[in-house]
Amino acid sequence: MPSFSSSLEEAIHRALALANARRHELATLEHLLLALTDEVEAARVMRACGVNIDELKAALTKFIDDELEALIADVDGSEAAPTTGFQRVIQRAAIHVQSSGRTEVTGANVLVAIFAER
């Protein structure tokens, strides 16, 4: 199985931390995408596609804060768990990297895998 780049590992931890900071029970793909805006490889791909990263960050933050209130946990100190979609995206990226003969999963791979999620 391929390994994760250190910047991708940091982004995954950041996604979970974003959910935890808001007391969300679950870390969603929106949390993951927001964290990927600060991951080197994913941000490079976004910029190459003409994405205004600052606008994307603002829109994602607004969505997470306004639309995901139902995810707020009643139990103090609980840790956010990744949704099944979050887990599928990470797994899909790893499988794609492995099948292409590469050894490291980057944020760019995860970004591509997000677009395959329905």
Image: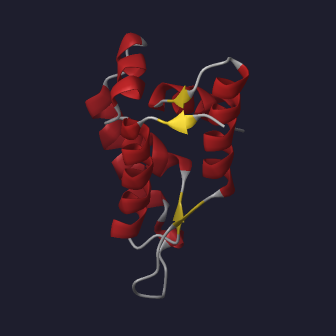
Picture residue at 68% right of the left edge, 27% below the top: 98
The front one of 72 and 17 is: 17
Picture residue at 31% right of the left edge, 28% below the top: 53
Judge whether 31 appears above or below 114 on screen: below
Residue 3 picture location, percent across and down: 54, 37
Q: Quadrant of residue 46?
A: top left
Residue 106 picture location, percent across and down: 48, 30
Q: 70 left or right of 59? A: right
Seen from this angle, which residue lies furthest bottom? 75
User: Which quadrant holds the C terminus?
Assistant: top right
Q: Quadrant of residue 16?
A: bottom left
Residue 87 picture location, percent across and down: 64, 50
Q: 34 left or right of 97? A: left
Judge whether 12 appears above or below 54 on screen: below
Q: Quadrant of residue 114?
A: top right
Seen from this angle, which residue lies furthest left? 54
Q: 10 left or right of 115? A: left
User: Which quadrant holds the N terminus?
Assistant: top right
The front one of 2 and 60 is: 2
Judge whether 107 appears above or below 20 on screen: above
